[in-house]
Image (cartoon, grey):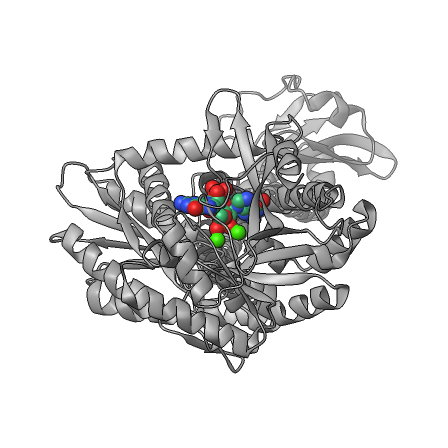
Amino acid sequence: MSPRTRFGLQAQLALALGLTLAMVLALMGVLLQRQRAMQAEVDLLGRQAVEAMAAEGLTRRGAAMAQQLADALANPMYYSDLDAIGTLVRQARRQPDVAYVLVFDAAGNMVNDGSWDMASYGQPMHDPLAARALSSTGRLTQWTDETIEVSQGVELGQARLGGVRIGYSLDEAKASEERAAGLLRGRLDALARRHLGWIAALLGGLLCVFLGMAWYAQRTLVRPIRALAQSARAIGVGDYDVPRPISQRRDEVGELVRAFSEMSESISRHDRDVRRMAYTDALTGLTNRLAFRESLDHRLLPRGSGGQLALLFADIDDFKRVNDSLGHEAGDEVLLHFASRIRDAVQRLGGDDAVLARFGGDEFVIMIQGGDVRAAATCLAQEMVQLLGQPLTVQGRQVFLGTSVGITLFPEDAASASALMKNGDVAMYQAKMAGKNCFRFYSRAMDQAVERRVRLEAALRGAWDRDEMSLVYQPIYRLADNCIVGAEALLRWQHPEMGAISPVVFIEVAEQSGLIEQIGARVLRAACAAAARWHHGGDGTDTLFVSVNVSPRQLRSGDLPELVTQTLRDTGLSAGRLHLELTETAVIGDEAHASTMLAKLHRAGVKVWLDDFGTGFSGLSHLRRVPVDGVKIDRSFVADLQRNPDDLALTTAIIAMAHSLGISVVAEGVEKQGQFDLLRERGCDLAQGFWLGYPLNEDEFIQLLA
Ligand code: C2E
Ligand code: CA
Ligand code: CA
């Protein structure tokens, strides 16, 4: 029963029935009242009729008797025969109902009153009826309450001798009237009682009908509606598990109940869908960020329970490259592969309570708990890095991707969910910084590193416009004749407070933040503009090239060829004098894309070199498939050239292989004459290094040329 339905259906119905009943009762009351009045009237009328009938009978009898007596009295009266008169009077008195018989003379004095003593003889009559009886000549009938009196003059011929008065008692008439009335009343009462019985039966029937109606309404309307209201309220507050009301009825209420059930079914289905959509990742079907956050909060809730947990943040390395080069479908496919591999690893090593979620993009997060979480997390992270590092086949191609994992522990690293999430992110970031495809535990020192990085990125934004950046040029020599043939443009950043910042540091930041696309374009323009101003002193030819470093991201963005041709046109530098240095990693990720880009650049007349050659994992065979004009042997090989026979052998092999493919070879980081000599001996084409010349600003470089 709801507190809200103050005046429910049932109450309304009861009220309506009550009112009807009251009205019926009132009506019955009025009817009974009328019946009683009628009864009284009938009673009265009956009495009057009986009375009138009795009176009429008496009057008629009286008239006959008075006439008869008057006739009989004429002679005795005339002769004053008192005895005869007395006999006649006494005879008359013996007649039924006769109360008195009075004979009076012409003067109105009493002659005989029927008594033996005749005490009233000769006396005048003084009773109330006497006067009119005396004055009347014919027959007269008079009434009092108790009697009817018929008087008749006694005449002989024309002479009036006196008269006779016969009084009839009404007692008997009254008694019979009373009897008749009593009989009638009895009949009427019986009739009324019968009526009352009928009315009572009718009322009883009516009450039964009302009760039946109330019960029926309760059963068919009130109860189902209450049940509906109850489940509607439950559904309203989000309890979709409440049992659905069912009904087999074929009426409107049944229809309502069924419609309601269908509606609540569809609401709950909708709710489930919404919940699923809100809490799961659409692509992989894994838990999403929201749901993960909730379950993390939930597990952190019981404080002091001593439960430890670890969060592992896994992020696919260079995933964007897959998306950019192979398209989003391939990207989705990769994500699905990764999701299933991670799921396997988590199932095997994460324990029963592990939660795996995808945070959107290429970020997966795992929560494990119970036991030695540090050891378990290490184990799982190692497995993941190993497992996810294995090549994938996507759309018929092999894709090499790595994963960086950051791990944070509760309660060691932080107490709150949001701090833990941040820590996990920081640790993952550090794993990326540490060279990717590895895992790192969070440490407080990381926070500072990350903070520094964020500061650096902010400072980098607009550094070029604030004139904090400049280019220096490191001369590149031909080994054969020791002539300068060009220079590599290297970017410098002099921050007003932080001082000189190494490109190893800030290029990485620029790459990660996307700033490199802007900076790279400016470097290209400035380097080309500078090279256009260079003139080779000696023989007067302006064949000096400038070599510009291009970051992987620039190559991937796709508009590099257009940018290059535009820049060349604007600066007036001939295409043959521009060399672009690409790293191996920029090229191997997506060879198809890289090849198209390189082909376009070649068509424009620009030369492309593969930088840091030997450090990547592409191997020599790679050179066959990527159309480059030269390779730059990494300075780590050059550094150990004299001491490490393996490095010498590799360098020699690279040179031979490159030459067999018609590719020229540049050696970087030549710091000693011994290295220089060795390289020349092995047939290396060009070289740069501190021993040959430090990076110089443009003026210094022009001086060097002169
Ligand atoms: P990198 O392309 O391998 O550039 C050569 C680096 O080796 C330069 O460092 C240069 O100063 C250094 N070097 C030259 N000769 C020697 C030597 O004899 N011994 C030793 N130990 N080092 C030598 P730098 O200028 O610090 O540049 C570091 C890296 O930053 C570059 O490596 C390049 O990858 C990147 N970088 C520099 N400028 C740019 C740029 O404008 N754009 C892009 N995308 N990357 C750049
Ligand atoms: Ca370079
Ligand atoms: Ca290099």
Q: Position of residue 287 (x, y in %)?
A: 39, 59
Q: Quadrant of residue 626?
A: bottom right
Question: In which quadrant of the rendered image does the C terminus lie?
Answer: top right
* Residue depicted at 51% across the width and 30% down the height: 115
Q: Position of residue 19 (x, y in %)?
A: 56, 43
* Residue depicted at 42% across the width and 64% down the height: 616
Toward the viewer: 231 or 359?
A: 359
Q: For residue 254, say whether it is visible.
A: no
- In the visual, does 406 lie left or right of 237? left
- In the visual, does 483 lie left or right of 674? right
Q: Quadrant of residue 325?
A: bottom right
Position above or below: 687 against 422? below
Toward the viewer: 150 or 281?
A: 281
- In the visual, does 472 lie left or right of 337? right
Q: Position of residue 572 (x, y in %)?
A: 82, 48
**Residue reaching furthest to the right:** 158
